[in-house]
Image: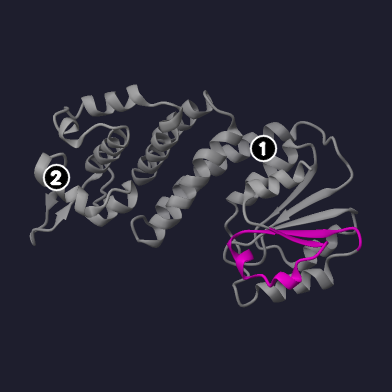
Amino acid sequence: MNNVKNVFSIKDLENITGIKAHTIRIWEKRYNVLSPIRTETNIRTYDLSNLQKLLNITLLHNHGYKISKISKLTDKKIPELVNEIISDKSVKHHAISSFKMAMMNFDHALFFSTYNKLLSEKSFRSVFYEVFIPLLEEIGLLWQTDTITPAHEHFISYLIKQKLLNNTEIVQSKAPIYDDKIFILYLPMNEIHDLGLMYLNYEIINHGYKSIYLGESVPLDSLKDMKKYFDNITYICYSTVEPNKDLINDYIKQVNDEVLDETSNLWVIGRMIQNIDPKLISEKISTFSSIKELVDTITY
């Protein structure tokens, strides 16, 4: 934590830990659990060590420890006690907190040690569903509230991508089991949020199907080209921000008219599906509200 200069407001602490600013002020004033730095205008700010301590205090408090008791523990004893009480129930919360600290401090070592510990106890699938998905959702909220910068988000996303690529490479070494359909995964033009699509690629391959990952900003002509080589195509489009809500329905119509044929269909997932006209849903076009829902469909 020594060489990264990060300063947080009390509102930032509330956003990251989930503890209300009012409660933090009470804990600080009554029990002296944090050591804020005061600006020249007497505004409280907090450094990374304060954030780390508050995350640990939050876990202890959620496990029934009274703040009056926590306040009497030394700074060394608090993380020791956290490690002692980590159970299956709390491991998710603790891992998410550790990943957030790794992100705030741009700390590769903390990310890898947290990930490796999780992987020693859980499958990669469990780690992704139980920890990475909630983590990414929290990061999205932190970014929207200006608690973190785009640099923080890019840093943690890249490390998660590394793990996705590593695990995908392992399952790709096996030949596909099924040949009744092929999945083609892509992001529409100007869409760059690819983590969810990368995970779907892993799951499809792991389920024994052939998956072709085209990546971001794929034009419709590239989708049409795939019909020269394959039949029974299921296109999977992940739309987080593009096409935007004003264009998504026109885009779905265009894919239906120009790309789909009697042997192909389109599955759409991502935030933008909430703006799709239900009348466009058909035997050929389906929407999915979550990664799990789509993955469950593959197994049927």
Instruction: Give the residue drawn at x 78%, y 69%.
Output: 255
The answer to whether residue 124 is above or below residue 51 is: above
What's the residue at 24%, 37% (across, down)?
Answer: 53
Q: Residue 201, image x and y in percent?
A: 69, 45
Instruction: Assign the C terminus to one quadrant of the image.
Output: top right
- Nearer to me, 212 or 282: 282
* Kind of residue sitting beneath label 2: Glu
Residue with the mark numbered 2: 28
Query: Residue 94's x, y, as percent?
Result: 39, 34
Residue 189 got which mark? Answer: none
Left or right of 190 in this view: 156: left
Res 265 quadrant in image: bottom right
Residue drawn where x is 32% and y is 32% of the image:
63
Question: Is mark 2 in CB contact (under 8 Å) with mark 1?
Answer: no
Q: Position of residue 137 (x, y in %)?
A: 48, 52
Q: How many marks?
A: 2
Number of residues whose C-alpha sits closer than 10 Å to that of mark 2, classed few (under 14), some (14–19) or many (20 or more) = some
Q: For this rendering, which residue is in front, 6 or 240?
A: 240
Q: Is residue 155 above or below residue 187?
A: above
Residue 65 in sight: yes
Residue stretch rendered in magenta on the structure? 262-287
Q: Name which of mark 2 and mark 1 comes first in the sequence.
A: 2
Q: Is residue 138 left or right of residue 221?
A: left
Q: Is residue 274 magenta?
A: yes
- Amino acid at pointer 1: Thr
Callout 1: SS = helix
- Residue 130 counted in the magenta span: no
Can the viewer see residue 9?
no
Mark 1 neighbour class, 10 Å CA radius: few under 14, some 14 to 19, many 20 or more? many
Q: Which residue is mark 1?
A: 168
